[in-house]
Amino acid sequence: MAPAAQAQSADASASPMQSVNVVGSRRATSSATDTVVPVDVIPMNKAAEQGAQFDLSQTLTYISPSFNSTRQTGADGADLVDSAALRGLSSDQTLVLINGKRRHTAALVNIFGARNRGSTGTDMNTIPTMAIKDVQILRDGAAAQYGSDAIAGVMDIGLKKNIGCESSVGYSQYSAGDGKNYMASAYCGFAMAGGTVGVTGEYLDRGRSNRAEPGNPRTIGDSKSENQTVYVNGEIPAGAGGKFYFTAGLQQRDASSGAWARDGVDDVPTRNSAAMYPNGFVPFINGELDDRYGIIGYRSKLGEWNTDLSQTYGYNRLKYNISNTLNASIANLPANKGISPSSFNAGGFSFQQTTTNADASRYFEGLVGDGMNVAFGAEYRREQYKIFAGEPGSYIDADGPGGGNAGSQGFPGFQPGDVTNASRHSTALYLDLEADLNKKTKLQGALRYEKFSDFGSTVTGKLAGSYSVNDAVLLRGSASTGFRAPSLQQAHFSSTYTDFVGGKPTDISITPAVGAVGQLAGLPPLKEEKSRSFTLGATWTPSGALSVTADLYQIKIKDRIVLSGLFDDSNYPTLAAKLATLGVGGAQFFVNSVDTKTRGLDLTASHRGAIAGNKLTTFLAMNFGKTEVDAIHAPAALKGYEDVLLSERERLFLEQGGPRRKATLGFDLTTGALETDFKIIHFGPQTLGTWSGTASGVANQRYAPKTSADLGFTYSFSKNTKLTFGASNIFNVHPSVQDPNETDNGFKYESVQFGLNGTSYFGRLWVKF
């Protein structure tokens, strides 16, 4: 299934195969205007041929105003995997599909310093832009149609399988001279056994950037990343009118990010050794990422019914290696004379998901009104999450109290007690109806039952409709309930690191509710988040050249899962005494404790025209959104400690992890062989918390609205060869300056809005052959 209405005609039943299509299409950010719910259809050919951004997350950030992804710095594993989200909600509240099939999430759960802390998400950058035909963004709650995670909306990434070959090579760097990117990508589609198969290969080498001031030993900016990716996508006729289809993707990524700097002799012996780093050092958190994805399926006719049976597989693994580091407790042993290994295998985690789907649909003429499409199906999904320990040197305290800190500096390894092997399965049944009541009125309804082995069952529903006032104006609206199952990462993530309290080594634990520490604290197991969503909108298409859409929305989420603050002897002595019996001095927990309300407005407009005989396309897209925490429901064991459970700083991450408004205004002018693309991107204000907090008299970080601009020129030597060059953020705009002692990453800029790197220059050559 794709996140759009089905296009049906009077003679649909006579066709050998009915297919699910997007109703309406648009270029760049002008939305489809005749869908019952708001759907953006973003063709990706121009981005792959001429785009200034080389990865999918950044490409969509500068096209879709409801989509947001900001590269993190100083956020440990989150520096290596860009998180992305719709409408300012968490990254795990958007469901991502590929060719209509569920895509797996990353194994990483964002913890330290990340905007989407406490959440998982889909790693969009594992999919090469050259492989993509279009991206469909359903801006509406859709859990009743697609299951868990579809609270904010659904993104369906459609892959190419057309015949022909093309390639693109690109280079970019920041005006500061760093952050050099090298990209080579190629696609080739060919006929095979009466069908088509498309193969895409991509190599992307993203260089490290550093915006730290002179004298600051930190490395602050883009992480280094080297991606090698292959995707195959095809469809072959099989049987009477049937089609066998398949998709396979593989990415190997080596990434590296700088951690906080350690001082020289001032940090000896706790975090440094004068024999190794007398002038201080910056540890590097290196990640080896392995991502795999596959779909096999068969579509056919069974009488008058269209049937689709498929199997989807997804796997994501991240292994940590910490380099340019030391274990100070090892170095501090007299026999070692200040020397420790300088790199450690710190362990890691993996996530695996298999999904079996059986779907059927049929269009009945005259059953209700002019006709009705009936679809139903079943799904079985199995998931597995593992944490594996690092080598002992990455976590041990070799010299005991009062000496060097335990574990590898920058990122302590996972301990044997953190090792996890958790799994679950779920089953689902759904019914989806769409009726053409008459030529002006459409009505859709969906009902879904889903049962999980680890927390129980849930039922969700959706009702949507549209009414054509006339040929130019359409009114539409929807109401739905939804849910998001707690991810296995949230339910079972465990990490223990050693801190020194009163001169004694103390274990600090980020622990699952079902673990020994969570049970001792009296925490209930995680359960699903529940949502209620409403949209109300209109579209206006007075001519074939102009289209406008406007959609209001409200999303209420109950029992959102958050990562709590640190509970220890300083704020909850009674609990700390219990934790001490397990040798734990402090703990953080994942808990269902927050209710939020998100309200907003999406606006899109596009116009195709001419100026002085030259083709001019103009588009405008805007999102205004506001998320507020309505209530905090602490579990019984944490009652009265709501300010620790969700501090002001953590609340602001929920409410303003992304800008509260975003707009893109683009102009594309074609004059003969020369195409000029000018785009203005506006990011609204954000407010984030500080380390000290307003209770200490320190004001929150306030980021003023900022407006950036991109400019590109494309010269077509022929219809098969194009050269593009230009710049992003041409006015070198940066976020508002803050007190680096109070920011999350210890720098004067946070990773907000459009990032902190400044102007970037790029060039790209595209050839079709």
Image: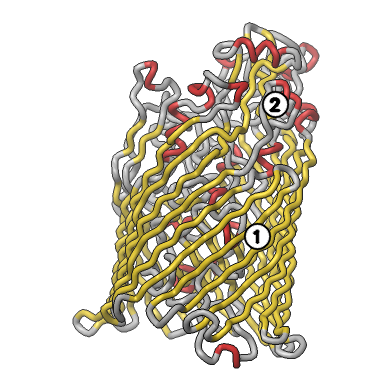
Q: Residue furthest top?
A: 502
Q: Earlier in the sequence, mark 1 or mark 2?
A: 1
Pick the front one: 650 or 204: 650
Q: Which residue is mark 1?
A: 228
Q: Is residue 385 left or right of residue 741?
A: right
Residue type pointed to by label 2: Gly
Label 1 neighbourhood size at 10 Å, few (<14), some (14-19), many (20+)?
some
- Residue 518: give its label: 2
Residue type pointed to by label 1: Gln
Disc 1 and disc 2 in contact, CB within 8 angstroms: no
**Residue 82, visible in the rendered structure:** no
Residue 189 on image: x %, y %: 63, 81
Residue 95 on image: x %, y %: 57, 56
Pick the front one: 463 or 340: 463
Q: Residue furthest left?
A: 612
The picture quadrant where one finds residue 99 is bottom right
Give the residue drawn at x 39%, y 57%. Answer: 65
Residue 156 on image: x %, y %: 55, 65
